[in-house]
Amino acid sequence: MLHQFEEPVISAGKGSGAIFFSGCNLRCVFCQNYPISHKNKGKNVSIAKFIKIIKSLEKKGAANINLVSPSHFTAQIISALKIYKPKIPVVWNSNGYENADTIKLLKDYVDVYLVDYKYSSNDLALKYSKANNYVENAQAAILQMKGNQPKDVVENGVMKKGVIVRQLVLPGQSQNSINCLNFIAKSLGSNTIVSIMSQYEPMYDAVLFPEINRHITPLEYKRVVNHAINLGLMNSFTQELSSASKEYTPKF
């Protein structure tokens, strides 16, 4: 699909050529894409068919090819990109729970890394995403992504190369977000493009966790945004709280 609701330099007015992959290596209890990530809704495609999908999105005028939750299909994706590398940027849209050695393999194939840094605490990652050692893996992966694409390049409002780090503010967890921003500023630099997201919507099994079964408050979000400003993270995208709406969730 042509996805209009990514960051402005990703959707870029034209729409991002999003390809969603079935399955996910995280089990987030609040997942908004749970029909495909948890329940594996989707269809089998060959590498040849996958290349045709890429070409069709190019033909529709997509700003880029946006591979959403692609990690568990890395080998197949590389095989496809060896055969056909699109003329528009390839975006690796990842939850951050990656192996740094795998990210190294993507160096010649991926132009933009759009990566979540969800948790600064392994306890939170285990509780809400059933992920062991999330922090160590995500930090190493993000650093490798920056090594693969050290310079951010934006031309005519479209990101051509570089890294964007997303941070989703969770209810009652503004300190988690602040700690994540501290890592980004210290390890990647204050020029890093950061997307501070207020779009948390309690979906899927969030109802089983009362403390996150709500939207975030204006004060929680303001606290995180103010901290980003204080850190000098001035290349940051922010959201209106109204972005926490099911209307922005793709229908699968």
Image (tube, rainbow, N blue to C red):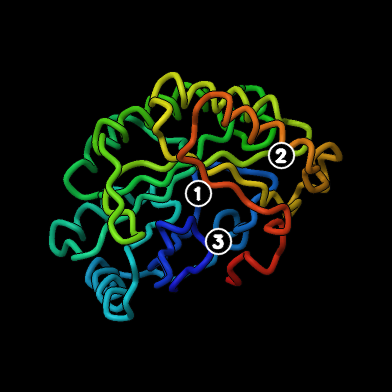
- Which callout, 2 or 3, points to the residue nearer the camera? 2
Q: Position of residue 230 (x, y in %)?
A: 58, 25
- Which callout, 2 or 1, points to the residue nearer the camera? 2
Q: Which residue is mark 1?
A: 24
Q: Position of residue 135 (x, y in %)?
A: 51, 24
Distance from disc 2 to disc 1, alpha carbons, whole Å, reads 27 Å
Instruction: Find residue 33 and report its image quarter.
Output: bottom right
Q: Which residue is mark 2?
A: 221
Kind of residue at disc 1: Cys
**Label 2 crowd bin: few (<14), some (14–19), many (20+), radius 10 Å:** many
- The residue positioned farthest toward the top in the image shown: 186
Q: Which residue is mark 3?
A: 36
Left or right of 226 on screen, residue 158: left
Which residue does the image show at 45% across and 62% down from the upper left? 20
Mark found first going from the N terminus, 3 or 1: 1
- The residue positioned farthest toward the left in the image shown: 83
Q: Position of residue 24 (x, y in %)?
A: 50, 49
- SS for dot 2: helix
Left or right of 47 on screen, residue 202: right
Kind of residue at disc 3: Ile
Which residue does the image show at 57% across and 31% down from the upper left? 229
Left or right of 153 on screen, residue 33: right
Which quarter of the figure is the C terminus placed in? bottom right
Which residue does the image show at 24% across and 36% down from the upper left? 148
Mark found first going from the N terminus, 2 or 1: 1
Mark found first going from the N terminus, 2 or 3: 3
Which quarter of the figure is the N terminus placed in? bottom left
Q: Position of residue 171 (x, y in %)?
A: 76, 38
Distance from disc 3 to disc 1, alpha carbons, whole Å, reads 8 Å
